[in-house]
Image: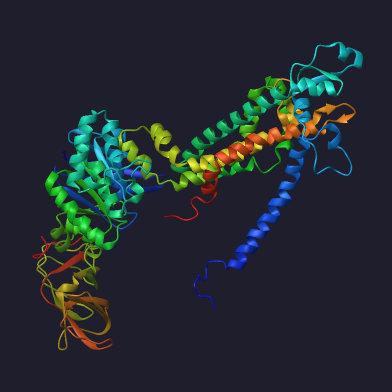
Amino acid sequence: MSQIKIVNLQKSFGDFTAVKNSNLTINDKEFFVLLGPSGCGKTTTLRMIAGLELPTSGEIYLGDEEVGMLRASERDIAFVFQLFALYPHMNVRNNLSFPLKMQGYKKGDIKSRVEEAAKLLRIDHILNSNISSLSGGDRQRVALGRALVRRPKAFLMDEPLGTLDAEFRELMCLELKKLHLDIGATTVYVTHDQLEAMSLADRIAVMDGGEILQADEPNIIYNKPKTKFVASFIGSPGMNFFEVNEGISKDQSFVNIEGAKFEIPKQLEESKGSKNFFGIRPENLTLNNSEGLKGSVFGVEYLGSRKIITVKTSLGEIKVKTDISVNVKLSENVQVKPLNNNIIIFDGQTDKSLNSEFIK
Amino acid sequence: MDTSRSYLEPSSFSKKMAAAIIIVYAVITLIPISWMVMTSFKNVDSAISYPPEVLFEPSLEGYVNLFTNRSRQSKEYLDSLPPPKNWYEELVRSREMVITGPSKFLGRYSNSMIIGFGSTFASVFLGALAAYAFSRFRVPLKDDLLFFILSTRMFPPIAVAVPIFIMYRKLGLGDTHLGMIILYTVVNLSLAVWLLKGFMDEIPKEYEEAAMIDGYSRLQAFFKVVLPQAMTGIAATAIFCMIFSWNEYAFAVLLTQFNAQTAPPFIPTIIGEGGLDWPAIGAGTTLFLLPVMIFTIILRKHLLRGITFGAVRK
């Protein structure tokens, strides 16, 4: 098991730059998730770590070794694909043995390792089955097993749960987490599903447009996003933003939005320009009939334990996450106000969050 | 109203109609072929009798004539010979002839085999490599190259017959097996690349990537992971290539005479006494039909899957 470090990594396909000058350190035994919308460069980054793509420039360290230009088979990593990529002409046992055979292990060793991995993944009863007869979940277990038997320096997973249906996905999510706790292998996991990322990751790197915007623990990513994109991408629904047409100065604790005054956490940093954004998460807003921004109810979504209410106001649509007991009708007039001071100001020029008492 | 079947399923009446049409079509297609096979088992007289004989006494004269050279002899000479050693000598003697040696048919037939299978193998092998590259790698000007490859099929090959004839004479490739294999491979290659690229595109690249991570090189992954999965496409492509190079007539007439002449230009030249030896020609074409038929039957299972393969993505 090993630390993975990427330094100034860049990948271009012709004119298109898929990964821009990225730096990242993934600690030993860490479950690290690369999260972002499709086309953000997360899969390309993973494939470069695996050796399936060669970097245009930059270095990749696996442990102490620079592996950027090595063949995939020379890197001692295992890869789990979204489409499983099990060899269809082999049965489960042969699929699991294949990587060991390729590395010249003895027959007895192969057998014991395969059986050990099969037991861990609870697929020992289907070792002699054909791949085509397996369910999606079992196929993914076999794919994990094929990665596991090698005991590689790192596991790389490219949306391994993407093709499973929702019920299976949750189950496999739990199993993956447990598996990681059991074997403690460095894992890099790519997904576009923030829930998956939140529940699995020790740390998450949010990517967009080929850049790593923030790499932090899930709760920090959620509560203290470093950029406006991270704030809007994480959370369901994402953060609400309002334009603030004034510069933010140090120690400021109020902003004016369309003539109304709003309290904000004491700012520790000044903004670069005079157009900024006021960001607040839907659960930090509340509905009432006496104070705050006036608007009318535009939509109500039930989430079981919570409700998401969309309110149309002069500042645009605002999403409010409320208790299930709140009863509003469509088109009803309501007022929205912040519940607390968990507010982040984003610099309109850099899209970065400004330091304040709330987010340092 | 019968509601036991779905709207999408054809009614039993239309199924029967379809079956009837197919049977009629099959019979129409089979008439000339069965006439050819029948002719091959007639003797020289019954083959050209009028009205044509549908029921006849079968004879192997056509096959004997196909494989032998004979000369007519006088009755006195024939009587002076020792009795015939086997059935075909007897058959030839009854026509007042003696066998003077084997005919060229077997040689022409094996030329066809060597050139047909050789060029099929070369087209499929080279086509698979090119198709794989086009399917997987970022090839500069990929679309233009693919179109260029296809464009070699847009004119009839015979349009370039004269330049090829001159080139082959200068290069010493005229009337050689290698020359014919190269020629048929070149003609077939564009078809092979296009057909196989479609099949390769359908094979998820994750398979070979998984194999490469597990320890294969790119080339090993190609041979051991990609090719087995492309078998249906390879079989379908091989049949198309084989049919073309096996049947090709124009270039064979132009470029081959002795050494590398294939069966198609040879068979029509089988001349018997006083005209064409129809039973021998029938025998030649019947035997000529067999390899492609057997080849297609062997690969039929793949072919059926191959043609519809990839129409629906799982």
**Residue B62 in view of the camera:** yes
Which residue is located at x 47 percent, y 38 percent? B133
Residue B190 visible: no
Q: Residue at x 63, y 28 (%)?
A: B113
Image quarter hosting the C terminus of chain B: bottom left
User: Of A169 and A5, which appears nearest the observer?
Assistant: A169
Please tell me in which quadrant of the rendered image residue B168 appears: top right
Left or right: where A289 falls relative to B209: left
Tell me residue A300's x, y (percent): 26, 80
Q: Quadrant of residue A56?
A: top left
Q: Is residue B313 above or below residue B234?
A: below
Determine whether B67 is above or below B32 in the image. Answer: above
Q: Residue furthest front?
A: B83
Whole-percent x and y of residue A22? 25, 46
Identify the residue at horizontal 8%, vertical 65% (top origin). A357
Residue B198 is situated, as x and y percent measured from the top left of the image, at 51, 46
Q: Is residue B87 left or right of residue B244?
A: right
Position of B1 relative to A59 (above/below) = below
